[in-house]
Amino acid sequence: MLVFYTFATDTFIEMNYENYTLENGIRIIHLHSKSAVGHCALIINTGSRDEENHEHGMAHFIEHAIFKGTKKRKAYHILSRLEDVGGEINAYTSKEETTIHTSFLKNDYERAIELISDITFNSVFPRKEITREKEVIIEEINSYKDNPAELIFDDFEELIFKNQPLGKNILGNPKDLKRFTKKDIESFITKNYNTNEMVLCSVGDISFNKMKKLADKYFGKIQSNPRATQRDQINNYKPEIKTLKKKTHQTHCIIGNIAYNVHDKKKVAMTLLDNMLGGPGLNSRLSLLLREKYGYAYHVESNYSPYTDIGLFSVYFGTDKENFNKCLKLIRKEFESLRTKKLGSIQLKKAKRQLFGQIAINSENAANLALAIGKSYLLFNKVDSLDRIKEKIEAVTVEELEEVANDVLDIDKMSMLVYQ
């Protein structure tokens, strides 16, 4: 499913972005826009895969906890600081990033940047607020468990990345969560919130000189804290098939394989292949097959998630129990077709045009764009133009697609998880 595509790129329109690095290593990237609304975010190269065994769920917990009070603000004042002027602040945690993002009227740039800095570096984690927030997250965990179509993705990653931090779910579990103390939180932050692994990104109507001054004012005095260790590499994948009994009306299934990491040159071809198979278009191969032709599934999708050292490709579908084997047979047949039959030139041209169009349209959302250029700068220390992205897509050949299909869509290398 298409959200962002992380080529060596992550920017989707022709742009003249400007960048700057503070003495402590925090990087700034800004794109001027004449919109009345500004968007600013801090992206930190730390997520759930950076947790040790006793820290499961810590990255996500901190994402919640930083909103609960700073040296000069209580929780209410944090939430009201931007919302009182019509803006908003939020955050999310992924396997490899923690992101605090804001949207606001352009005159409130300083208000937003100061608030991001305050909650990131000055949070005090008051015991009463933290205790209450643990209960909130436990309810979030329970809610998640009630949704098998979402839960199965976490269980599948645990199957693929067995006994690895990357395989653990982001939310954690109630048992570990209840044990977390203020000291544990501060220890994780000191170890993992590294200044040379942070990017402050912005899209809005503010001059770059003003943006630099605000960054210097609110982030420049933060003590340098460079990353001292590297993430453990994952190289122990073994295919596995697993069935879990669940009280669900449908059978839910994910089938997939490891794929290319975010730096791999084959990533663009993999992205194109994924989009053809089960991207957001209703004309994707699996949607046309399982939903439109046979009516076996309401929802079917494929996903490609490239991480820093490995990638994951998967196909998810939900169907009535009596149609499960029929769906699986059709999906495997489609995999084999892509591995053994070369695409025609017209098919390839159509697939490239569709992917490029989706990316370009997605770039019209300035909030998404701010996050996209920030993540690109975090990972690659550069941002490609839309023309460069188009060049990379156009460079994919029929032979490269076939090679990627044979690497990733090999049934013998695939794992499968079924809820029934």
Image (tube, helix red, strand yellow):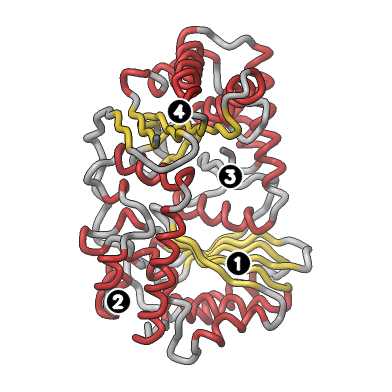
Circle 1 residue: 40
Mark found first going from the N terminus, 3 or 1: 3
Mark 2: which secondary structure?
A: helix
Circle 4 residue: 266
Circle 3 residue: 3
Residue 353 against residue 380 in the figure, above or below: above
Mark found first going from the N terminus, 2 or 4: 2
Q: Residue at x 56, y 66 (%)?
A: 101
Q: Mark 1 belongs to which amino acid? A: Cys
Percent x, y of residue 247? 41, 43
**Direction from residue 252 to residue 131 in the image, left or right:** left
Quarter of the image that includes the N terminus: top right
Q: Mark 2 belongs to which amino acid? A: Glu
Query: Residues under labels 3 and 4: Cα distance?
Result: 19 Å
Residue 93 against residue 278 in the figure, above or below: below
Tell me, yes or no, if residue 322 can be seen here.
Answer: yes
Q: Residue at x 78, y 63 (%)?
A: 34
Badges 2 and 3: C-beta atoms under 8 Å apart?
no
**Direction from residue 73 to residue 365 in the image, left or right:** right
Badge 4: few (under 14), some or many (20 or more) residues near its Cα, within 10 Å?
A: some
Query: Residues under labels 2 and 4: Cα distance?
Result: 39 Å
Q: Residue at x 53, y 81 (%)?
A: 217
Question: Which one is nearer the viewer's eye here, 118 or 409?
Answer: 409
Mark 4: which secondary structure?
A: loop
The numbered dot on residue 186 is 2
Percent x, y of residue 260? 40, 33
